[in-house]
Image (cartoon, rainbow, N blue to C red):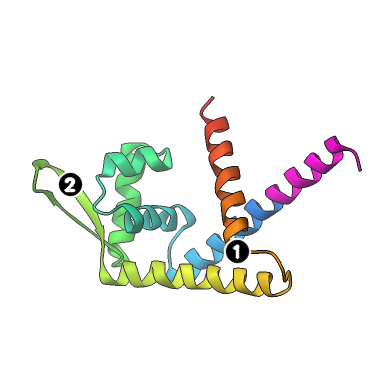
């Protein structure tokens, strides 16, 4: 296999991984009674709380109107709460509720279980090295997407 063919095979494997991950996220969202974008927003809030709606919109590339509707849905489901920003009473901060934190822990447990199952069939691959490679690839792709 030529170098070009090896790179293409890797590109196709990465694309397949991304699509499979998206499919899993879709299923997790449905299990929680959310849409995929709702789950992405909940995950951001969970990992970056407290979060301002503007920050969330920028992170997810969504307009303020779209973010408002999305937050309404997630709040109605009981996964987030909006409160005033103590540093600027004109703005809001979003936090995950205990139910929202529990939901995200469940999502991560599902993902961990799938990875554990996969790693069990590929003995000899050190997790820390795989993590380093994946982080490097993710950073490179993030940088490439900003061009």
CA separation in Å, label 1 and label 2: 39 Å
Indicate yes or no whether the magenta region holds residue 12: yes
Q: Quadrant of residue 78?
A: bottom left
Q: Nearer the viewer, residue 8 or 39?
A: 8
Indicate yes or no whether the magenta region holds residue 50: no
**Badge count:** 2
Q: Nearer the viewer, residue 113 or 53?
A: 113
Q: Residues within 10 Å of mark 1 (few under 14, many from 20)?
A: few
Q: Quadrant of the N terminus?
A: top right
Residue furthest to the top in view is 147
Q: Nearer the viewer, residue 29 or 48?
A: 48
Q: Is residue 132 left or right of residue 84?
A: right
Most frequent secondary structure within the magenta stretch:
helix
Residue 87 in the image: state x and y as whole percent.
9, 43
Residue 21 in the image: state x and y as whole percent.
60, 58
Q: Quadrant of residue 65?
A: top left
Please report the residue visible at 55 percent of the width from the left and 66 percent of the height from the top: 27
Q: Is residue 12 left or right of residue 88?
A: right
Residues rendered magenta in the picture: 1-15
Q: Secondary structure at mark 2?
A: strand
Q: Earlier in the sequence, mark 1 or mark 2?
A: 2
Task: In the rendered view, tell whether residue 95 sits above or below residue 30.
Answer: above
Residue 143 in the image: state x and y as whole percent.
53, 32
Task: In the rendered view, tell whether residue 56 sits above or below residue 36.
Answer: above
Residue 84 in the image: state x and y as whole percent.
12, 50
Q: Nearer the viewer, mark 1 or mark 2?
A: 1
Q: Nearer the viewer, residue 24 or 133?
A: 133
Residue beneath disc 2: 92
Per the rendering, the mark at residue 127 is 1
Per the rendering, the mark at residue 13 is none
Q: Secondary structure at mark 1?
A: helix
């Amino acid at each position: 296999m030529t170098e070009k063919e090896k790179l293409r095979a890797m590109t196709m494997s990465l694309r397949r991984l991304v699509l499979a991950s998206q499919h899993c996220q879709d299923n997790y969202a449905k299990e929680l009674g959310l849409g995929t974008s709702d789950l992405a927003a909940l995950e951001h809030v969970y990992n970056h709380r407290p979060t301002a709606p503007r920050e969330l919109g920028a992170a997810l590339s969504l307009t303020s109107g779209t973010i408002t509707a999305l937050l309404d849905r997630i709040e109605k489901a009981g996964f987030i709460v909006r409160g005033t920003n103590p540093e600027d009473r004109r703005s809001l901060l979003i936090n995950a509720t205990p139910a929202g934190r529990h939901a995200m822990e469940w999502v991560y447990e599902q993902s961990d279980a799938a990875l554990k199952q996969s790693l069990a069939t590929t003995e000899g691959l050190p997790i820390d090295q795989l993590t380093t490679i994946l982080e490097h690839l993710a950073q490179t792709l993030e940088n490439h997407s900003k061009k």
